[in-house]
Image (spheres, rainbow, N blue to C red):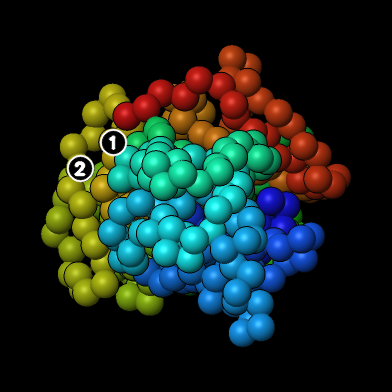
Amino acid sequence: MQRCLELAKNGLREAMPNPSVGAVLVYENRIIGEGHTSAFGGAHGEVNCINSVSEQDRHLIPKATLYVSLEPCSHYGKTPPCCDLIIRYKIQNIVIGTADPNEKVAGNGIRKLQEAEKTVIVGVLEKECREFNRRFFTFHEKKRPYVILKWAETSDGFLAPLAALRQAQGDTISDKKPVWITNTYSRQLVHKWRSEEMAILAGTQTVLDDNPQLDVRTWTGTNPVRVILDRNGRIDDSYSVKNHKIKTIILTEKTNFHNLENLLFEVVTFDANLPYTIMDVLYRHNLQSVIIEGGLQTLQTFITANLWDEARVFKGSVVFGDGIKAPQLTAESTQKKAIINDELIIYRNYGQRNNI
Ligand code: AOF
Ligand code: ZN
């Protein structure tokens, strides 16, 4: 099962919004086939695993044990049911990491295999299998994307310098850029993180202050869909997030924009449930994860609503002395802290999170 997860790692981002699933066929302690889920819409892990078995080993398939990190599917989606394939190949023993939360499957795959009189073991490395596809599980179980908060704070706890300091940068858009707290390596790491998620979100003030691009330019991989909060339509077409290179959702009450091509507008009535409303829009767009990159108000709103799963916090060595205070994680959410290095702390929120 550990090997299944290793294999699945190779296809995690490409498979999204599908889960990436690893599968291994073992006959008498020898791996005769292995595979993982192809890019979205492509073959499932089980199919790739069976196809990988060499000509001389194919007769062993019915006698081999199939290890798979997620319950084999039982439905017709973009591909036919993996259960049918397993039954057709007469594989007798199946070891499953964890059940599939997708309501189209949700135990039906396991049942189908049992009804076909297979020996089925469920729950091997279950915690690890759920953790690996945590975006997919959160999406189906909580009906919202997996939420990652990210910010950088100075060693004296500030997110940004005082507006007065910013003024010195100038007022034209080309003058606007982020004030860096972290080093170049961390910046590149953030681009890698962006490439791992389906969406990236920023609030109005961050866009107005920093004119960010919110892309993955110092890393390879897919750009996440940009989600911009612009309630009052203050972000005009000259800002980078309004360029047409990347799919962008703008949540706004005002629709009087030009250059609509490639931008996807959502008109949302902002109410007291703001973070839930945002999550609902992302859910409807099938975006299974989002990395929220500020600013203070946006981050704090999600923290207050206890609507986050991970917080990745950089602690730079810079000192601002004054400015905008960094967000504060609330004590009531159950948090686990992992100190990755001097500069980076990752908090996990295992607390009770409200569903939409
Ligand atoms: C598996 N093996 O490798 C994956 C599974 O539209 P489809 O046919 O690609 O089906 C997508 C659903 O199938 C997905 O939402 C999830 O429930 C399951 N994913 N199942 O047996 C796999 N990726
Ligand atoms: Zn399948």
Q: Position of residue 259 (x, y in %)?
A: 21, 73
Circle 2: is it few (<14), some (14-19), or many (20+) Cα within 10 Å? Answer: some
Q: Nearer the viewer, residue 183 or 83?
A: 83
**Mark 1 residue element:** helix
Asked where in the image residue 333 lies, by quadrant, the reply is: top right
Whether disc 2's CB lies below 8 Å from ligand 1 is answered: no
Marked residue nearer the N-terminal end (1 or 2):
2
Q: Mark 1–mark 2 contact, CB under 8 Å?
A: yes
Residue at coordinates 39% horizontally, 42% vertically from top-left?
115
Give the spatial CA distance, label 1 vs label 2: 8 Å
Residue 337's mark? none
User: Dot 1 corresponds to which residue?
Assistant: 277
User: Dot 2 corresponds to which residue?
Assistant: 268
- The single residue placed furthest to the bottom in the displayed view is 55
The amino acid beneath tag 2 is Val
The answer to whether one can see residue 78 in this image is yes
